[in-house]
Amino acid sequence: MRDADASRQRGLGLSALFAALSALCFALSFPLSDTFVAGWPLSFAWPALLAAAARVAPRKRELAAVVFIPFLAAFLAQEWWMRHITELGMPFLAAYLAGWTVILALLVRRIGGTAEAPRWPFALTLPIVIVAVEILRGDLVCSGYAWFFIAHPMVEWTEVAQIAALGGGWLLTALVACVSGAVLDAIVRRGSTRIASPIVAALLLAAAFAYGSARLAAHDAPSSTAPSAPRILAVQTNLPMSNKLAWEPSAQVEDFIAFARLTIDGARSAKEQGAPIDLALWPETTVPGMGLEPESIKTLVDSNVYPGNRFEEGLRDISKRIDAPLIVGSPAFLDLRIEGNRFRWKNQFNSAYLVDARGQQGRTDKIYLTPFGEMMPIISNWDWLEEQLLALGAEGMTFDLDTAKEPRNFTVPVRAADGSTAHVDVGVPICFEITEPWASRRIAFPNGKRAAGVILNLSNDGWFGPSRAGRRQHLQVSQLRAIELDTPVIRCANTGMSAWIDACGRIKSSLAPEQGGALLAQPQPSVSTPLAVVVADGIGFLSIAAVAFGLLRRRLS
C-alpha cells in the first residue's frame, strides 16, 4: 500500500511539474512585446509537456487540477490587458480558456493513453486532438475565440509557415503538434513507434521546409503579367480606448483634424517621392459621429443636431486634397431618427466606408462581432442579463451592434505606370474578423472564387491598452491569414501595429505602436486560389471526426 501511495504521489508530482512547464512554454511562445517574438520555438515544446502530464497523472480529476491552475495563470498573464476594459470578464475569459486546455489534456490521455496503458502514438494523438480543440474553441462553440493557436507564433518560421497555403492554419498546427508528439514518443514509447514517429515527423518537417522555400522563391520571382500594384497609405491614429467610450464633441473635432493632417502630409510626402497614392486608409471606428448614410446625415442636418454633415464634408475635402479615395472605419446607423431628446435607429453596424470627393461610394459591415468586445457569447441572447453583467464588469460599454449577412468588397482605381487607370478589388475584414479563418475566407473568396486581390484590415487596437504583446499577436494572426489566402494584407490599426504584409506572411514594413504615423504600401494583388481556400476548415472537421472515433473506439473496446 505504501509503495502504491508513493507511486501515486510521484506520478502526481511529475504531472504537476510537466503541466507547469507546459503552461510556461505556452505563455512564452507568444510575443512578449511588439519586437520580442523569439519564443516561437516553444510551440514545439508545450504540447509534448502537456501530453507527458496527461500520461503520468494518477487520475483524471487530478490531471484536471494540475493543468487548470498553471494555465489559468498563463492566460491571466496573456489577457492582463483586458482588466482596463472589464475586471470581471478578464478572469472569466482566462478561466474559460484554461478549461479548454483541461479538455485538451483529458482527450490526450483518453486517446493517447497512460504510462501503464499506452494507446495511439503521441505523434498522431497530439495533432488530431489539438486541431479539434482549436477549431471547437475558436469557431464552433460560443461564437468562437480564435486566439492563442499554435500556428500564430509559427509565422515567425517563414519557410515552414507556408504550408498554411495548403491546409490553412490547421495544417500548420497539426505539423507542429506532430513533431512535438514524436519527440515524446522517442522518449517514452517502446518498439517500432519509438523509431518510426521521429522519422516520420522529421520527414514531414523537412518536406514543409522545402515546400515553403520553393513557394517563397516563386513569389519573389519577377513577373511581367502581374496586375498593377496600388499605392496605399495606411494612417495610424493614436486614440486612447477611453476616448472611444466617452469621446467629447470638442475632442472629436480636434482628433479628426489630426487624422486629416496625417493623411494629407503622408499623401504629399508620397507624391514628392514620385509615388502618388491610390487609396488612403483610416482605422476602425475613427470617424466620429453617426456614420455616413445620406439619410442619417440628412436627419442630423434637418434637426440641426451635432455633428450634422461636418465629418462627411471633411472626408470629401480630404479626398479632394489627396486626389484619392479613402476607406475609413465608422459606425453605421440605419433608419436614424430623433424621438424626443434621444436617437433611435433600426440597425447599427461596425462598418467601413469608401469615400471620395463626391461622398460615400460604398459600405461594408462586420459579419463577425468580437467576442467579449462587441458581444457576449450566449449571454447576448438575453438583453437584460447582458446589461446587468456589463454594468457590473464593464461599465460604459454597450453590445448593440448587428451583423451583416454578407460582406461587400470595394473596387479602387489604380494609376498604372503607363498613365492608364486599372482597378483592384479589395476586401475589408474589420478588427477581429481577421482572426477567424472562415470570415476572412468569406470576404476574399465568397463561394470559393477570388473577389479581392488585397485585404485591408481596419482595426482599433486601442483596446489592448499598454499591451504591445497583444498588438503583435494580432499582427501575427494577420500574417497567417495572408499565407492562407495567398493575399497581401495591409493592417491599419488605431494605436498600431499597422503593417504591410505580403502574400507569404512577411512583414514588408510596419509602424511602431502607440504613436501616430502613416505607412506607404504597394502590395501586389493576388490572382491565384490557394489550396487552403478549397480545403477550408476540412482538416479541423476531420480532426473532430478522428477524436470522436477514438473516443467511441475506446468505449467499445
Image (cartoon, rainbow, N blue to C red):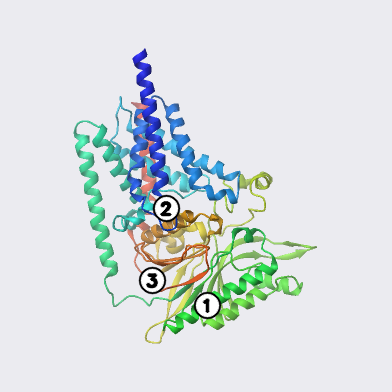
502, above or below 169, in the image: below
Element on which disc 3 rests: loop
> Mark 3, mark 2: which one is toward the viewer?
2
Quarter of the figure with residue 63: top left
From the viewer's perspective, tell me whether residue 516 is left or right of residue 185.
right
Q: Amino acid at mark 2?
A: Pro
> Mark 2, mark 1: which one is toward the viewer?
2
Element on which disc 1 rests: loop
First reached walking from the N terminus: tag 3 or tag 1: 1
From the viewer's perspective, tell me whether residue 402 is left or right of residue 506.
right
Residue, disc 2: 31
Q: Amino acid at mark 1?
A: Pro
Instruction: Measuring from the top left, give residue 12's x and y in whole percent.
Output: 39, 26
Residue, disc 3: 525
Mark 2 neighbour class, 10 Å CA radius: few under 14, some 14 to 19, many 20 or more: many
Quadrant occupied by the C terminus: top left
Q: Residue at x 55, y 42 (%)?
A: 91
Quarter of the figure with residue 465: bottom right
Distance from disc 3 to disc 2, alpha carbons, whole Å, reads 29 Å
